[in-house]
Amino acid sequence: MGKKEVGTTHNFVLSKGIMQVGAYSALVGEDGTKRLFAELLADPDRPEVRPQEVYQAILASMQPGWTLRLLQVFWPDPEPRLAFQRQVQEWGMPANEGSVILIQGLNLAVQEHPLPFIRRTILEFVLPGDEGLAWWEGLAGLTQAFGIRVEYVLAEDIRRLLEWMFNPILSQYGS
């Protein structure tokens, strides 16, 4: 009996590509496994969001022997910076020189400041067959009761996720 390591990235690095499994994009592992990905999203300001309980419900609903990995990825988020830049541009050019310098300084400061990062919660599920696919399809309904919504990750986003995890290029985000 071989020793199985916990938390390795071996199957990510040696993947064989991406294929469709039903309505979902799956990463094909070097061992032939099909790995489905979904992102858990919530508005943390809402009182019905209960992340601890949703994790317990997800794990309790799984069959013995199934594999699920919870990934917490810190991802660059350019949107707050872009939103502020749009707001500054909407101000228009003021008549006095001091305000012009202020607006130019704000734009420069925002461009030079590093991007904020958001924490993304990604589920990776090793598909065990048709029974697992039915469970995966019901995941959105299961999490909804806890104020969490599920977005299934598409092929292009799986590629972007893998690139970020294994070769993040911060320059493409303007940092």
Image (spheres, rainbow, N blue to C red):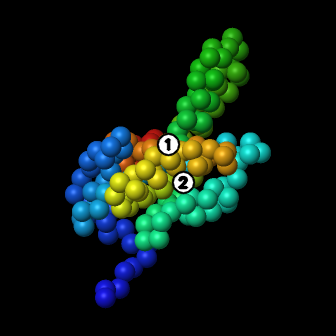
Foreground residue, 163 or 59? 59
Q: Is residue 116 left or right of residue 29?
A: right
Residue 78 seen in the figure? yes
Q: Is residue 93 left or right of residue 36?
A: right
Foreground residue, 79 or 145? 145
Q: Position of residue 97 (x, y in %)?
A: 68, 18
- The quarter of the displayed image where residue 33 is located: bottom left
Residue 139 to residue 71: above or below: above
- The quarter of the displayed image where residue 96 is located: top right
Residue 149 to residue 35: above or below: above
Q: Is residue 5 left or right of residue 62?
A: left
The kind of secondary structure element at disc 1 is strand
Please report the residue visible at 68 percent of the width from the left and 27 percent of the height from the top: 102
Residue 169 seen in the figure? no
* Residue picked out by circle 1: 151
Q: Position of residue 172 (x, y in %)?
A: 39, 43
Of the residues shown, which amino acid type is indicated by label 1?
Glu
